[in-house]
Image: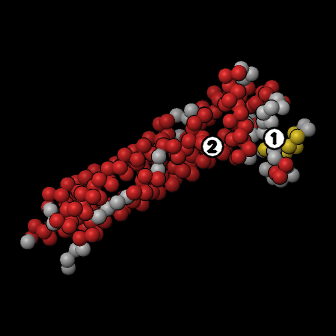
């Protein structure tokens, strides 16, 4: 049975949807350890190389070039190894997210409590983060803001009127504040996206194995002619 030439064309452009900035809403101001994103960086590099390999494999199939098909096979095999490594890195660092993030949040709490002008921009940005994610503080709720909690300009932890009497908020003094801490939101965000990355890495690894089989089959067919 003759193998269709177009079967060896392999373009994993889905990798271009992934980038280290995937976590930018969380990492930009909090300076979370970049080692958590090692798997993401590796997937980006893999995706770029695969686009070139896809072109090489397609040309090799159309022109029936054994040299191109062999290069495609070797390149795709190396990419498969890197991709599995990225998936393993994601699994390893997912278990360390709680420890790494909590250490970062502990240091960041000092910035929330500071009354120095250099931290005002961060405090305003974090207050917006609270409103967008319906959370309060980093690790200990309103206590993380210290004396800044009562600053009128910040409105730290304060629930919007539409959420005041819902399960998201609790009455505190003269206002309603969000019950959930932002640390929980950040950790869950990172863990959820790590699962997505691992799923894509291992899922596309299966497709790449099929691509390896097709390319080698076509290579063998050409060599028999």
> Alpha-carbon neighbours of circle 1 within 10 Å: few (<14), some, or many (≥20)?
many
**Residue 27 place in picture, x, y as percent:** 57, 38
Judge by depth and name the residue closer to the eye, 222 or 152. 152
Vertical position of residue 4 compared to residue 96: above or below: below
Which residue of the protein is positioned furthest toward the top in this rendering?
Answer: 116
Q: Tag 2 or tag 1, which sits nearer the N-term?
A: 1
Quadrant into which the N terminus falls = bottom left
**Residue 56 place in picture, x, y as percent:** 24, 57
Which circle, 1 or 2, is nearer the viewer?
1
User: Which residue corresponds to the image point at 70% horizontal and 27% vertical from the top-left?
Assistant: 120
**Residue 202 place in picture, x, y as percent:** 41, 57
The disc at residue 158 is 1
The disc at residue 186 is 2
> Alpha-carbon neighbours of circle 2 within 10 Å: few (<14), some, or many (≥20)?
many
Whether residues under marks 1 and 2 lie with C-beta atoms below 8 angstroms apart, the answer is no
Residue 172 appears in the figure: yes
Mark pair 1, 2: CA separation: 19 Å
Residue 202 appears in the figure: no
**Residue 225 place in picture, x, y as percent:** 8, 72
- Left or right for 56, reference 84: left
Which residue of the protein is positioned furthest toward the bottom in this rendering?
Answer: 1
Judge by depth and name the residue closer to the eye, 125 or 195. 125
Instruction: For mark 2, give the secondary structure.
Output: helix
Instruction: For mark 1, give the secondary structure.
Output: loop
- Left or right for 198, reference 53: right
Q: Quadrant of residue 201?
A: bottom left
């Amino acid at each position: 049975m003759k193998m269709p030439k177009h079967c060896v064309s392999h373009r994993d452009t889905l990798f271009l949807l992934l980038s280290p900035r995937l976590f930018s809403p969380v990492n930009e101001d909090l300076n979370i350890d970049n080692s958590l994103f090692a798997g993401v960086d590796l997937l980006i590099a893999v995706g770029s190389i695969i686009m070139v390999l896809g072109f090489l494999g397609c040309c090799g199939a159309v022109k029936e070039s054994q040299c191109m098909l062999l290069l495609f096979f070797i390149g795709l095999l190396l990419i498969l190894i890197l991709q599995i490594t990225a998936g393993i890195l994601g699994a390893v660092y997912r278990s360390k997210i709680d420890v790494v993030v909590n250490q970062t949040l502990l240091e960041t709490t000092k910035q929330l409590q500071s009354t120095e002008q250099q931290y005002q921009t961060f405090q305003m940005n974090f207050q917006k983060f609270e409103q967008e994610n319906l959370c309060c503080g980093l690790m200990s709720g309103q206590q993380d803001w210290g004396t800044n909690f009562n600053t009128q300009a910040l409105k730290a932890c304060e629930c919007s009127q539409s959420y005041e009497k819902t399960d998201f908020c609790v009455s505190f003094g003269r206002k309603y504040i969000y019950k959930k801490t932002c640390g929980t939101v950040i950790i869950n965000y990172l863990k959820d996206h790590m699962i997505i990355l691992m799923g894509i890495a291992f899922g596309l690894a299966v497709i790449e194995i099929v691509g390896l089989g097709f390319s080698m089959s076509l290579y063998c067919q050409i060599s028999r002619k």
